Image: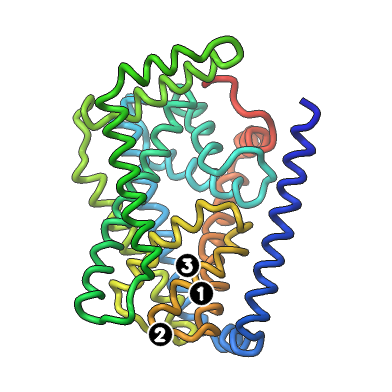
Amino acid sequence: MRWLPWSLSTFKLVRFVLVITALAVLLLKVGRADPLQRLAGAHVGFIAMAVVVQIIDGMVRTWNWRQLICAMRIAPKVDYSMVLRLYWVGAFLGQTVPSVAGTDAVRAILASRSFGGRVSEHVAAVVALNVISLMAGCTVGLAVAAWLFLTAPGRGVRPIVILLFAGALTAAVTAFWSAQRQRALLVWALRLMRGPLLQLRRGLRRFTHRLLIFDRFPVPIASIFAVSFLTLAMRATIYSLIGSSVGIVLPAAVWASLVPAAMLSGYIPYSIGGYGGDQAALVYLVTAFGVSAGSALAFALILPLMAITFNILGGLFVLSNRYAAGSAIGIASGPGADKS
């Protein structure tokens, strides 16, 4: 289809224009002087500590990915060091290589080629990892919102964010319940997919089969959720350290509520590399707790650098194996694997 490259290029161009526009409007509205002064006076030590915590967070999150791959029985035995390598390489490629697939899709393709199993099955593991992390974050976010409502009326989580937390949790539980209890309806819907959609149907069937793990396999659910809450605590620590670098001091519970809110914002494609609409969202979220708009914007401009630094460090794994590097870059920039 000749229109596809043009459509993708147009989408990227429009997205880039939106990012620049969002940042320009935000700077004009807040005022350039205050956030720039905050950035110039930021404490580098706090930022360096945040980078270290970001690396530890990625390593712990990788452990959960490994737990899910094993629980779904996609691969009989998976070495953690290899999973960490793939996780980091996927992060690097998603950050630096133009791709028609997202970072998680690249990770799923790399995992399929390294451990075996269909790409759709590995996509299910990555999706489960993200959903569990989001569920843990939204649960904490609702708990913090209730605590702030009782202890600090007038300063708390924005009402729209509370609705998003509740909506995300409800959607995740409803989707899982529907897929679990209404399998006949799901199978019937999949059988309607014929012709060119037949290959997609097979992938969706394998994806669903692996995703419904909690009633089919002996999954260490307590361990998986415990690690998810641990990664949430570490990300809240990163937020706290970046906030401290620009003079923002908030309770730990507040930072914990901001993490899932930022995660939900990240699902909207109005940013590139964490810059764009995400800054507007973070300023909106942080100022609800009495923080000045200038300080909030300085915080929002530094925060994406943590993930960018972590992602770029994944290039060390790519450079350590030239064959793997060439194969991985081909996956990221090409049509992908041939297995669904």
Position of residue 30 measured from the top left corner of the image (x, y, whole percent): 60, 83
Answer with mark 1 or mark 3, whichever residue precedes in sequence: 3
| Amino acid type assigned to the residue bearing label 2 in the image | Gly
- Distance from Cα at disc 3 to Cα at disc 2: 26 Å
| Amino acid type assigned to the residue bearing label 3 in the image | Val
Residue 260 sits in which quadrant? Answer: bottom left
Q: Between 229 and 33, which is closer to the camera in this rendering?
A: 33
Q: Which residue is mark 3?
A: 51
- Distance from Cα at disc 2 to Cα at disc 1: 11 Å
Disc 3 residue crowd, few under 14, some 14–19, many 20+, Cα 10 Å = many
Which of the labelled discs sits on residue 290, or is there none? 2
Position above or below: 237 against 225:
below
Residue 253 sits in which quadrant? Answer: bottom left
Image check: 110 left or right of 22? left
Q: Residue at x 57, y 61 (%)?
A: 274
Residue 65 sits in which quadrant? Answer: top left
Answer with mark 2 or mark 1, whichever residue precedes in sequence: 1
| Amino acid type assigned to the residue bearing label 1 in the image | Val
Q: Which residue is mark 1?
A: 283
Q: Residue at x 51, y 65 (%)?
A: 306
Q: How many marks?
A: 3
Q: Residue at x 52, y 58 (%)?
A: 310
Does the CB distance between marks 2 and 1 fall below 8 Å?
no
Does the CB distance between marks 1 and 3 fall below 8 Å?
no
Mark in front: 1 vs 3: 1
Disc 2 residue crowd, few under 14, some 14–19, many 20+, Cα 10 Å = few
